[in-house]
Amino acid sequence: MAIKVLIPSTLRKLTGDQSLVSLESTTVGGCLADLDAQYPGIGERLRDEEGEIRRFVNIYVNGDDVRFLEGPATPLKAGDEVSIVPAMAGGS
């Protein structure tokens, strides 16, 4: 059984307009690498030049922020839900 990755609307053009994709990844870092392998270009939107999750991208596993778990090393198991949430800024 795969993990589910929820794709935000701002990145869906890179996934062929899919809002949900399934992967067989075992860690968050592996999930991001697998996403980029399957959907070229999405990785550079999620990771910086050093391979770290970009500052303004939030990744959640089953509702928990990976920054408070094990970051990219956070383990994944079948049935987990990974949410990618770009931070919003601006306003007046």
Image (tube, rainbow, N blue to C red):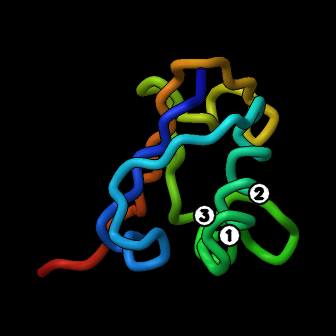
- Sort mark 3 into few (<14), some (14-19) or many (20+) by Cα contacts within 10 Å: few
Q: State the residue position of label 2.
A: 33
Q: What residue type is labelled 1?
A: Gly
Q: Which amino acid does label 3 sit on?
A: Arg
Quadrant of the drawing holding the N terminus: top right
Residue at (39, 79) in percent of width and height: 13
Q: Earlier in the sequence, mark 1 or mark 2?
A: 2
89 with respect to 2 (left or right): left
Residue toward you, 83 or 24: 24
- Indicate the position of residue 91 as horizontal and vertical percent values: 16, 78
Image mark count:
3
44 with respect to 10 (left or right): right
- Indicate the position of residue 16 as horizontal and vertical percent values: 41, 73
Residue toward you, 38 or 67: 38
Q: State the residue position of label 3.
A: 55
Q: Which of marks 2 and 3 is nearer the N terminus?
A: 2
Residue at (73, 54) in percent of width and height: 34
Residue at (52, 60) in percent of width and height: 57
Q: Earlier in the sequence, mark 3 or mark 1?
A: 1
Residue 67 appears in which quarter of the rendering? Answer: top right
Callout 2 secondary element: helix
- Indicate the position of residue 43 as horizontal and vertical percent values: 68, 70
Q: Which amino acid does label 2 sit on?
A: Ala
Q: State the residue position of label 1.
A: 43
8 with respect to 78 (left or right): left
